[in-house]
Image (tube, rainbow, N blue to C red):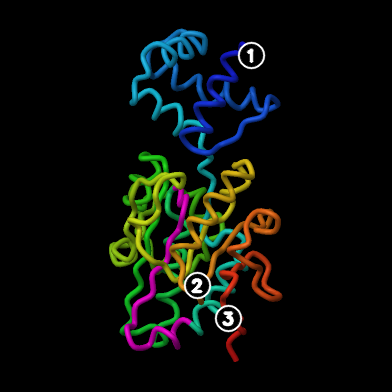
Amino acid sequence: MKVEDFDMFSALLKQRSGLVLTPDKAYLLESRLMPVARKWNMKGLDELAGSVRTRRDEALLRDITEAMTTNESSFFRDQRPFDLFRDVVLPPLLQTRASRRTIRIWSAACSSGQEAYSLCMLLQELGPKTAGWRFEILGTDISSEMVERARAGIYTQFEVQRGLPIQHLVKYFKQVGDKWQINEQIRSMVQFREFNLLGDLSPLGQFDVVFCRNVLIYFDQPTKTRVLENIARLLPPDGVLYLGGAETVLGITERFKPMDNQRGLYVTAASPKLAPAV
């Protein structure tokens, strides 16, 4: 790939998705964009780059952006964040929200929906503890293809074997051909919509918990700061933010601070401490 084409694609992706590509990722750019070129009946990346420069077709730009955004996910990914949600994050919220009996959760950059559906299954497994409560779970992703996949809730055998307990597969899924579909009750617990984290977050409303795991690692520092500070505006004083294990707020924003002794959990700077359930 020509250096000027790499620079053009890199600038385009940063503007549209926040994704930062360094020159050592040229191979990734080439492998992800060749299928886009073929889809648009182009001979190769030279023609694709030329079309971007001259046509600026929104559908084409969208295909390029979606091809480059990472869509890696699995059920109960890393497990511990979900254990912490059940044992540390949820109990205080059930106490402080007892009068309204509603909790809102946002799964940002939700990919094909496994994180959001994992939360749904976890809540179902709590049984009487959450009976009569309304959990509003929103999953968003920049990729329209991923959002449609999440809404359908259909997964391959490989996908359901990654992190999903066999008892959950039996209880919450039905087989559809050689794939598995999560049941309608679980699907109805989540709303999925296409959304760009770089946009105005205020229309999403307030949330009690935000999962934004393994997203910031693809952004440069100014973009990380912007996203985190916008998320902080959506959380109440006792709200909780989840980040990935390799992510942090330290040196990026003062709007959040790490939760004491709980790796990957963050609270707003003025938040009270959350203690594990007794």
Q: Residues within 10 Å of mark 2 (few under 14, many from 20)?
A: many
Residue tagged 3: 272
Q: Residues within 10 Å of mark 1 (few under 14, many from 20)?
A: few
Magenta residue check for 108: yes
- How far apart are the two marked residues, 2 and 1, measured between alpha carbons? 45 Å
| Element carrying mark 1 | helix
Q: Quadrant of the C terminus?
A: bottom right
Residue tagged 1: 3
Q: Are marks 3 and 1 in contact (CB under 8 Å)?
A: no
Residue tagged 2: 239
Residue 115 percent across, percent down from the top left: 48, 59
N-term mark: 2 or 3: 2
Residue 166 percent across, percent down from the top left: 50, 65
Q: Which mark is residue 169?
A: none
Q: Residue at horizontal 60%, vertical 67%?
A: 266
| Element carrying mark 3 | loop
Magenta region, residue range: 93-111
| Element carrying mark 2 | loop
Above or below: residue 37 compared with residue 66:
above
Q: Residues within 10 Å of mark 3 (few under 14, many from 20)?
A: few
On screen, residue 109 versus residue 217, left or right, reads: left
